[in-house]
Amino acid sequence: MSTAQSGTVPAFPDTPAIEARGLTRSYGSVVALDSVDLTVGQGELVSLLGASGSGKSTLLRLIAGFDTPTGGGVWLHGQEVTGSSPAERDIGMVFQNYALFPHMTVSKNIAYGLRRRGMSGASVRERVAEMVERMKLDGLADRYPEELSGGQQQRVAIARALSYKPRVLLMDEPLGALDRRLKESLLAEIRRVHREFSTTIIYVTHDKEEALILSDRIALMDEGRVRACDTVANLYLHPSNEFVARFISNANILPVGAESSAFRVVSSGPDSISVEADGGMVHTLERGSARDADAGDFESSVRIAVRPEVLRLQSDPEPGMLSFQGTVGDTFFLGDLIEVSLETEHPGWPEPVLARVPRESAMGVARGDRVRLGFDPALASVV
Ligand code: ADP
Ligand code: MG
C-alpha cells in the first residue's frame, strides 16, 4: 500500500513559505518577468542571481506586493496574496540604498516599523534593544544615519526589517554599495541572522560569489525567466543547461560530434551519451536535466560542459580520459593553480579553451607549446 493511497501522510508536509506560479509582468511589449515558477521553503534562503535587467527586482516587487502581475500569482504560506497590499503580507524588505529615515536616530528607525504595526511603550523599547544587540549596534542607538558607516547603516536597515519578526525577508542587492571587506562581514551577519531567526529569505544579487556563499539554493535568472533553481553544488556539478554551466562554473562549452571535432557521438540516451575518442575508446557522459530532443532520438552532435578545473595536462592519451591537443596562448599564475589558455583547431570550440591545472604540472609550459589537455568524462556534463 502506497502512502498516497492511504491518504494519511501528505506528500509535502511543509507548506512553502513563498510560491510564485506562472508569474508574469509586462510593460507594453517588454516582458520583464516571463511565467516564473518559484517555490521557497520555510526557513530557506534562496538567491535570485542574474545580470542587470534579468528581472530579479521585478520578481521581488511582485512577491512583496509593490507591483501587480500581468499574469500568474503569488502564494505566501499557502494563502494566495496576489491582490493584497504589501502591509497585508508580513514581509520585511532591505534595499541597496539603505533607505533609513535621515532625521531619526538608529533606535527610532528600528522602532518605526513596530509602532506602525501598533506596538507601543515598553514592548517597543525591549524589541529595539534586542535588535540593537543582535545586529551588534551597541553604542550607536542614538546616532543619526549620517553618523554611521555604510556597513553600519545596512545593519540598521536589516535590524529595522527584522524588528517586527516578519516570516519573510526580501533583500534587493543589499550589499551592492559596500566595499569587498564590508560585504564579507555583512554576508556573515546575514547568515547568522538567517540561522538565529529562521526567517525565510530571498536575496537578490548579480554577484555570483555572494550567492554561492549565502544560499541554500540559487535561482539563476536570465531575460525574465528562471533558467535553473537548485543547490549550489548541483548547479556547479550537474548544470542542467549551457547557460547554467557558463554562469556558475565558467565551463568550456565544447561542441562534440561535428566531422572535424575531437570526439564522435556513438550512442545517445535520455540520461547519458557515449562518445568515441581517438584510438577507439568509448566514454559515457552524464546529461543535464534540460534536454531539447525527445528521449530516444539519436543526436550526432551535442555540447559538453567542461569546467577549467577538471582539465589536466597530459603527455599522451591516458586510459579513461578524453583528451585533445592545442597550442598554449597565455598562462596566468593563480597561486596553487595555473590558468592555461589553449587554442584548438576544433570548429565551434571556445577560443581559447581555459584550463586551471595544478602549478607543478604546468612548470615550463610556455606560449606556443603544443600540449594535450585531458579530463575524466565523469566530471563533464552534456548540456
Ligand atoms: P534586475 O533587477 O534583474 O536588474 P529588473 O527586474 O529591474 O531587472 O528589470 C527587468 C526588465 O524589466 C528590464 O528590461 C527593465 O528595463 C524592465 N523594467 C523594469 N521596470 C520597468 C518599468 N517600470 N517600465 C518599463 N520597463 C521596466
Ligand atoms: Mg534590480
Image (spheres, rainbow, N blue to C red):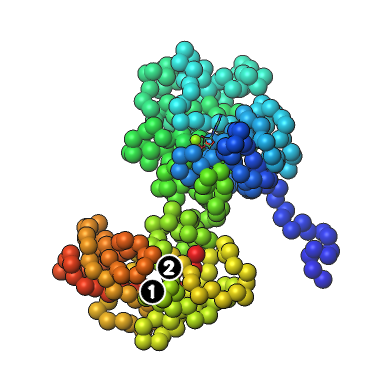
Mark 1 CB near ligand 1 (8 Å cut):
no
State whether residue 298 is above or below residue 99.
below
What secondary structure is found at the residue carrying circle 1? loop
Find residue 8 and report its image quarter: bottom right
Q: Position of residue 312 (x, y in %)?
A: 30, 71
Q: In the rendering, which numbered label is found on residue 261?
A: 1
Q: Position of residue 202 (x, y in %)?
A: 55, 41
Judge by depth and name the residue closer to the eye, 57 or 121: 57
- Residue 242 lies, in percent from the top left, at 48, 59
Residue type at mark 1 is Ser
Which residue occupies the foreground of this view, 140 or 26?
26
Disc 2: which residue: 255
Q: Is residue 298 left or right of residue 335?
A: right
Left or right, 134 with reference to 168:
left
The image shows residue 83 at horizontal and vertical percentages of 72, 31
Q: Is residue 204 above or below residue 136?
A: below
Above or below residue 85? Residue 183 is below
Residue located at (44% from left, 50% from top): 212
Residue in the picture at 57% in, 64% down: 291
Q: Residue 14 or 307: which is nearer the viewer?
A: 307
Quick check: marks 2 and 1 in contact, CB under 8 Å? Answer: yes
